[in-house]
Image (cartoon, helix red, strand yellow):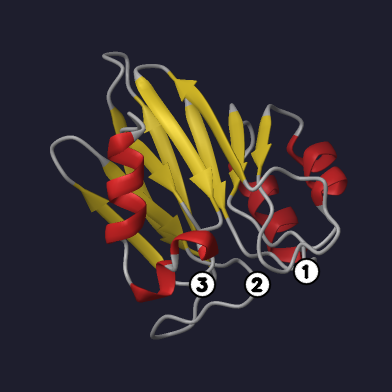
């Protein structure tokens, strides 16, 4: 299973469009918030199951602030992260996720890619496809592949 994880597109979907052309087919798209009114367009573009949450810039959105679901053996939580003060660190989010039984957590908000894999939990941020903030400022995303044994593998990728 091949899953594309993105965040913080902020209504600027050109990079997402180009990325989808390069990566098709994918089995699922996960967007960690701040789509800024583009959620219906993103769903049509993906042409696969889509999970998307509201970010701090998704004003008047009916998107959920969190989404939880299962991907194979993984109990997944997606959130934008601002309710967990993610800009200050991941500890609050990890503590809450562990208490609620999640073993895979995805967030956005910081516009910086992040991947941390502990023994019992993986926490990640794909960064931003539209307004990256990490050194080098390349638009980023994460590809998640689940192998034939049900194990997830993650790769942070950058657009050229």
Q: CA distance from mark 2 to mark 1?
A: 6 Å
Disc number for residue 130: 2
Q: CA distance from mark 1 to mark 3?
A: 14 Å
- Tell me the crowding category of disc 1: few under 14, some 14 to 19, or many 20 or more residues within 10 angstroms, Cα based: some
Disc number for residue 114: none
Nearest the eye: 160 or 107: 107
Q: CA distance from mark 3 to mark 2?
A: 9 Å
Mark 3 or mark 2, whichever is nearer to me: 3
Residue 119 is drawn in which quadrant? top left
- Tell me the crowding category of disc 2: few under 14, some 14 to 19, or many 20 or more residues within 10 angstroms, Cα based: many
Which of disc 2 and disc 3 is earlier in sequence?
3
Q: Secondary structure at mark 1?
A: loop
Identify the residue at horizontal 53%, vertical 31% (top origin): 68
Q: Which residue is mark 1?
A: 12
Q: Secondary structure at mark 2?
A: loop
Nearest the eye: 42 or 34: 34
Q: Is residue 111 left or right of residue 40?
A: left
């Amino acid at each position: 299973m091949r899953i594309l994880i993105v965040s913080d597109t902020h209504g600027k979907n050109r990079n997402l469009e180009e990325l989808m052309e390069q990566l098709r087919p994918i089995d699922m798209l996960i967007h960690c918030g701040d789509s800024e009114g583009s959620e219906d367009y993103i769903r049509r573009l993906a042409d696969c199951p889509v999970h998307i949450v509201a970010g701090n810039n998704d004003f008047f959105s009916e998107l959920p602030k969190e989404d939880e679901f299962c991907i194979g053996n993984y109990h997944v939580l997606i959130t934008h992260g601002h309710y967990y003060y993610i800009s200050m660190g991941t500890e609050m989010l990890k503590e809450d996720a562990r208490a609620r039984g999640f073993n895979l957590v995805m967030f956005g908000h910081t516009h910086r890619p992040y991947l941390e894999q502990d023994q019992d939990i993986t926490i990640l941020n794909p960064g931003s496809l539209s307004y990256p903030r990490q050194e080098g400022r390349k638009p980023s995303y994460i590809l998640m592949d689940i192998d034939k044994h049900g194990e997830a593998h993650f790769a942070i990728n950058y657009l050229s």
